[in-house]
Amino acid sequence: MGNLNYIFQKEIRLAAKPRGFHLVTDEVLQQIPELKKVSVGFLHIFIKHTSAGLTINENADPTVREDFESHFNEMVPEDQPYYRHTLEGSDDMPAHIKAAMLGFSLQIPITNGRLNLGTWQGIYLCEHRDHGGSRKLVLTLYGEAAQ
């Protein structure tokens, strides 16, 4: 990679989604046409919330996303007697724990103006609240400008 001569940042909003794991690759790509301006580089995605997370995983079979939701609900159950942060509802503290486990950012390589994801990889919004609302993402492109 040559000089980092292209840097761009924008904040986008994803449509509100119900609780669960949602494939949002296309929704993100529709809002960042500037991706085509990078020949080699990275897209950094940061979610500005503490009760939803981001990850990359299976993009073809929706049962994978259903299994993620089932497993995370078993691993981090609601209504535990040791939770003290309960004023915002029984799904709030578990949502914070789940989001912390998954993380709040992704870095994806860009090659020739496209995300260089594997064949079966997609970007997930991991919504851990029953009614989380729309979610804000900060998208930062950096790399070598396309000729």
Image: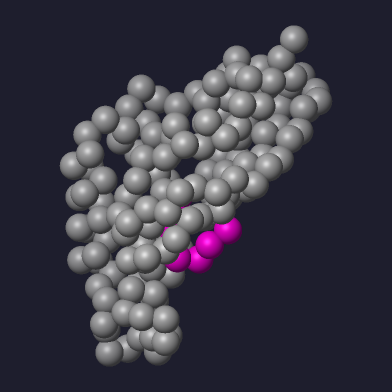
For residue 9, which quarter of the picture? top right
- Indicate whether residue 94 is drawn in magenta: no
Tell me the quarter of the image containing the N terminus. Answer: top right
The region drawn magenta spans 48-54
For residue 130, which quarter of the picture? bottom left
Residue 69, how many percent across, how many down?
25, 56
Left/right of residue 130 with respect to residue 62 in the rendered view: right
Residue at 37% across / 53% down in the picture? Answer: 17
Instruction: Give the colour scheme shown.
Output: one colour
Residue toward you, 141 or 129: 129
Q: Is residue 106 above or below residue 100?
A: above
Residue 66, how many percent across, how many down?
21, 49
Residue 136, how many percent across, how many down?
56, 53
Residue at 45% across / 27% down in the picture? Answer: 117
**Extreme residue in the top direction:** 147
Say if residue 86 shows up in the picture. Answer: yes
Say if residue 1 shows up in the picture. Answer: no
Q: Is residue 105 above or below residue 82?
A: above
Residue at 69% across / 20% down in the picture? Answer: 37
- Indicate whether residue 50 is drawn in magenta: yes
Left/right of residue 76 with respect to residue 1 in the rendered view: left
